[in-house]
Image (tube, rainbow, N blue to C red):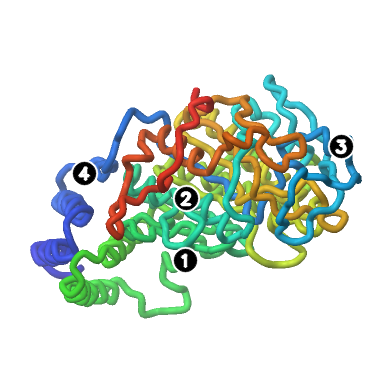
Amino acid sequence: MNFPLSINLQSRRDLLKTAGGGFGSIALNAMLQQELGAAQIPPNSVTQIAHHPPRAKRVVQLFMAGAASHLDLFDYKPALIKHHGEKSDFGEHVEAFQNGLGPWMKPVWDFQPYGACGKMISEPVAPLGSVIDEISFVHNVTGKSGVHSQATYLQATGFNRPGFPGMGCWISYGLGNLSDELPTFVVLPDHRGFASNGPKNWSSAFLPAQHQGTIIRPGTSDPITHLRPSGKTNFATSMADADGQAVLARLNREHARERPGDSRLEARIKSYEMAARMQLSAPEALDLSKEPAFIKKMYGLAEPGTQWPKTINAPEEADYFGRKCLTARRLLERGVRFVQIWSGNDNGFPRRNWDSHEDIERDHGPLANGMAIGTSALITDLKQRGMLDDTIILWTTEFGRMPSTQGSKGRDHNPFVFTNWLAGGGIKGGLVHGESDEWGYKPLDRRNPTEVYDIHATIMHLLGLDHEKLTFRKDSIDRRLTDVHGHVIKELLA
């Protein structure tokens, strides 16, 4: 701004004091130190809780929107092959989401064993075979709803209804940032649109607003919306910017005085400050052109004028998902703590999501192959850079699909059992924890299923957080990511 430093500092001090203490005071202190040329406060100085020594410090969540079929990708069921086409008999009344209680249906693709662990996976996800010994599968995960929006909320926020923070928001709140130059929690949505619930999946809800996810769209002309002035305008000059900031500072002070304790203004101020820093740091982080050709090829990105490798059955999907995975790696190594990658959107035909009511092969094939190529490369790349040991990768979806047919080629929703898998960051690789029954309909041991709360509790434990202690007081209730449930799955820990 074009006025004396003392006036500038005083206005910020007044503004942040009026908006409240806590994070505002820390932010003010950091700004004063930086502007006066003193030593910068360590990036992790906003850490609130450290319950025990962490095994990991970063997370990548891979979310397959629409409900990926465990039976056709990861959970091999010989009984479905043996009894394919026979009338399905679940031994109990089944409330199907639509009309998917036709005959038993074998997996669409053949399965083969991979790695020293001998894990059986299907053809489209075969690229994961090269890293299968790094992965632990959980085949007895259960949900609470067969409705996409509710089930997606549960996986993303720990609750099956709106109004609760995403997992990345909780981790941002509990651990703070690793870098002052990039957001703590970044979301890479499907390029075709949002999944069920859209941005509510990564909303901060009742947590301070600064912890919400920041959307980045790799490979687009404007990956971070409104980060830079539009090229169509000629009035966005440095002088106009300084004048605008002065007016905003005055308006913000007035606004804050009238709304004590409201974190939204403080979060907006922080977002502007972060945007200013990101104008310098984000373009470099998102510039994939500097990556070696062999790295881009590993992720499924073909150089212009070259042919796609024969192992890639769906080059467009490989490029879409691989580009997000490579971007995620670049963000992680530059200090982003939580990256959420989405595959699949909430609409469109032919389907480009995982909600395969009509045709599993048509819908799952390209998505699964692209996902497996990008994910395999991400695991390999993190490992060769020494980052896999402290980076957790979680693969999830809102629920599974039924072992019986819907029509002749599709499968209906199955909230009763499905698959998650984890790798890196203190996870024991090459393991299967929990089994589904012979049909892949429900957990084999129905008394001891794995719930999403257990997955969340385990991830938080590896990050050094006790899921029962990381709470936020809301409406006279100490809210937490795992509600009143969850336990650490100790069998998964290395």
Q: With 336 as the anchor, is 88 left or right in this view?
A: right
Q: Which residue is mark 3?
A: 81
Mark 1 = which residue? 225
Of the image marks 1 and 2, the number of the one nearer the N terminus: 2
Mark nearer the viewer, 3 or 1: 3
**How far apart are labels 4 and 3 at the CA level?**
62 Å
Quarter of the picture containing the N terminus is bottom left
Q: Residue furthest front?
A: 92
Q: Is residue 477 left or right of residue 322?
A: left
Q: Earlier in the sequence, mark 3 or mark 1?
A: 3
Q: Quote the CA–CA distance across marks 1 and 2.
A: 28 Å
Question: What residue is disc 4 on?
Answer: 40
Label 1 sits on what residue type? Thr
Question: First in sequence: mark 4 or mark 2?
Answer: 4
Q: Residue at x 19, y 51 (%)?
A: 26
Q: Nearer the viewer, residue 379 or 209?
A: 209
Looking at this view, is 88 or 249 the one in front?
88
Give the image location of residue 257, x and y in percent.
15, 72
Residue drawn at point x = 34 percent, y = 28 percent: 53
Name which residue lies at 83% across and 34% down.
79
> Which is more N-terminal, label 4 or label 1?
4
Residue 251 in percent (x, y) is at 21, 77
Evaluate if marks 4 and 2 touch, with contact meaning CB atoms under 8 Å apart: no
